[in-house]
Image (spheres, grey):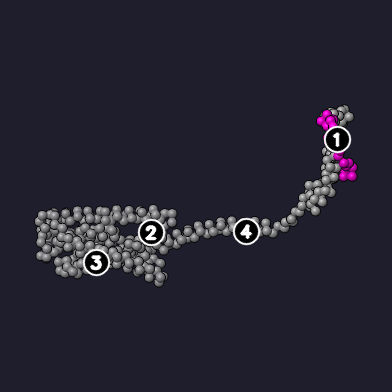
Amino acid sequence: MQAFVVGSLTLWGPIYIQYAMVILGDLQPCTTGDCENGEIAYIFGIIVILSGISGVWIGGEWAKRWRERGQKNADALVCAIGLLMSGPFLLAGFLMPLTNLPAAWVCLYLAETSLNLIWTLVGELTLAINMPSRRATANAIQILFLHLFGDAGSPYLLGLVSDVLTDKMPDTHYSKYLAIQRSMFITLFAAALAGAGFFTASLFVVKDKKKVEGALKGKNDAMTTSATSSEATHNSYELNVNSTVYTPITDQDMFQINHDKPIVAPEIDDVTRDDVTPARPPAYLSVIGKSPNGKQDVDEAKKSLLTPEATSDPMTSSVESSRSSTRSNSFLLPDAKESVI
């Protein structure tokens, strides 16, 4: 509704003052239909600019100091008071142009200033009562309805009412002045309705803010608890790891692990280290480098391994192989130990 009043004043305010000055004789009547009267529009523009700057600053500072004194719903109350204050100033500005034009300008400035108290506070209220994920949408909807039911249609509505009233009166400048004046009285009801709405909102805004703060606090607590649990689990793991005593493994230990275990053939329980005999190398290796016919002797030695005596008993061969391997390791044992030492 604030935009409803401001939009109406922006369009019809200069025209209304123009008719008042024509009636007072300070301005020549426009007979061609294309008269601009830039001086009136210039003065009205300065009033709108100054009232906007002062209204926004006063509204924000007033609400801030009121909150510091413990008034938690100060934003909504300042909006309500500003809109209700604008009503008397608007009424005086509408009634005084024919009696005291400078006073009418001052009253219009004070009315515009009172209306502009709410600009920053409305946005702050919208953000405060909505969750962060919904604030952009809520702000967009608020701006949409602000202009849709405000300055988008209010100039047309007031002009329509003025035309209806003009048709019932004589075609004079005074009739047009009265028609615009009476149509602009609608803005008084709009400002009062908006003020009542903000007073109603002030009864619930603190509760709504607490709901949002509680939801955000619960969400942050859940995230903090999850992070703390994860960190505690990590710290517990590090504590267990750090408290574990590790015995360093030396080369001697590795040698014992790899070489001190006796190799036992499957299903043979009586094989011990004392029973193991040194493994003999194949016969064909013993003749390499000793005989002038080395290759021929090696082939004959290989053939000797395929005799029935060498291949008759598989179990004996397996046991002998196991014993040979164990004995081979036992032969390597002293040398390996010396190398480790």
Q: Earlier in the sequence, mark 2 or mark 4?
A: 2
Q: CA distance from mark 2 to mark 3?
A: 27 Å
- Which amino acid does the dot numbered 4 rest on? Asn
**Residue pointed to by mark 4:** 235
Give the residue at mark 2.
126
Question: In the figure, is residue 226 to the left or right of 77?
Answer: right
| Earlier-in-chain disc, 2 versus 3 | 3
Q: Is residue 292 magenta?
A: yes
Magenta-highlighted stretch: main secondary structure? loop
Q: Marks 2 and 1: which is nearer the front?
A: 1
Q: Quadrant of residue 127?
A: bottom left
Q: Residues within 10 Å of mark 2 (few under 14, many from 20)?
A: some
The part of the chain drawn in magenta is: 272-297
User: Could you tell me if the residues under marks 2 and 1 are in contact, i.e. CB atoms within 8 Å?
Assistant: no
Callout 2: helix, strand or loop? Answer: helix
Asked whether residue 187 appears in the rendered view, the answer is yes
Say which amino acid is labelled 1: Lys
Classify 10 Å Cα crowding around label 3: few (below 14), some (14-19), many (20 and above). Answer: many
* Residue pictured at 39% horizontal, 65% vertical: 73
Judged by depth in the image, the label closer to the viewer, 3 or 1, is 1
Secondary structure category for the residue under label 4: helix
The N terminus: image quadrant: bottom left
The disc, 3 or 4, on the residue closer to the chain's N-terminal end is: 3
Residue in the picture at 83% in, 36% down: 289
Counting from the top left corner in percent of width and height, residue 62 is at 35, 69
Q: Disc 1 marks which residue?
A: 290
Q: Relative to the observer, which residue lies in front, 55 or 37?
A: 37
* Between marks 1 and 4 in the image, the one whose residue lies nearer the viewer: 1
Q: Nearer the viewer, mark 2 or mark 3?
A: 3
